Image (cartoon, helix red, strand yellow):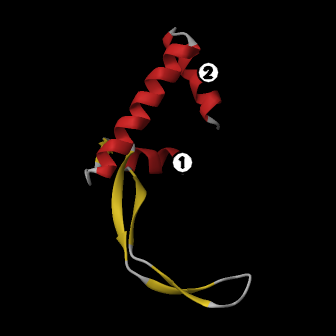
Amino acid sequence: MTKDQIIEAVSAKCNLSKKQTDEVLESVLDNITKALQKGDKVAFTGFGAFVISNRKARKGVNPKTGAKINIPAMKVPKFRAGKALKEAVR
């Protein structure tokens, strides 16, 4: 499902224009991004949570040349599915 399909579905269900729905979705995504940038966890009870995970530095291989490279430590976003979402997908 694409972002446009989500906007269309939410717009139809909530009787909002597609422009209004797009603005709401953009605001939600922007707020999630800002919270994660600050290191906060974003949780939707029953659905899941967005968290920041720290990856350690490691060695890797360039697939084109086969040369060994150092991959620096970094923070990465992760999503942990909630119980209700897991059960709905099963």
Of the two numbered discs 1 and 2 in the rendering, the one whose residue sits closer to the viewer: 2
Residues packed near mark 2 inside 10 Å, few (<14), some (14 to 19) or many (20 plus): some
Q: Residue 68: which quarter of the image?
A: bottom right
* Distance between the alpha carbons at the discs numbered 1 and 2: 22 Å
Q: Which class describes the residues within 10 Å of circle 1: few (<14), some (14-19), or many (20+)? A: few
Q: Is residue 79 left or right of residue 17?
A: left
| Kind of residue at disc 2 | Glu
Above or below 47: residue 3: above
Q: Nearer the viewer, residue 64 or 89?
A: 64
Give the total number of marks visible in the rendering: 2
Q: Position of residue 29 (x, y in %)?
A: 43, 36
Q: Position of residue 85 (x, y in %)?
A: 45, 45
Q: Residue 31 is drawn in which quadrant?
A: top left
Q: Is residue 82 above or below residue 12?
A: below
Q: Is residue 40 left or right of residue 73?
A: left
> The residue tagged with tag 2: helix, strand or loop?
helix
Residue marked by disc 1: 89
Question: Of marks 1 and 2, which one's residue comes earlier in the chain?
Answer: 2
Query: Could you tell me residue 39's position as x and y percent?
Result: 26, 54
Q: Amino acid at mark 1?
A: Val
Q: Is residue 63 visible?
A: yes
Residue annotated with mark 2: 8
60 or 12, which is in the foreground? 60
* Residue 58 point in image, percent of width and height: 45, 85
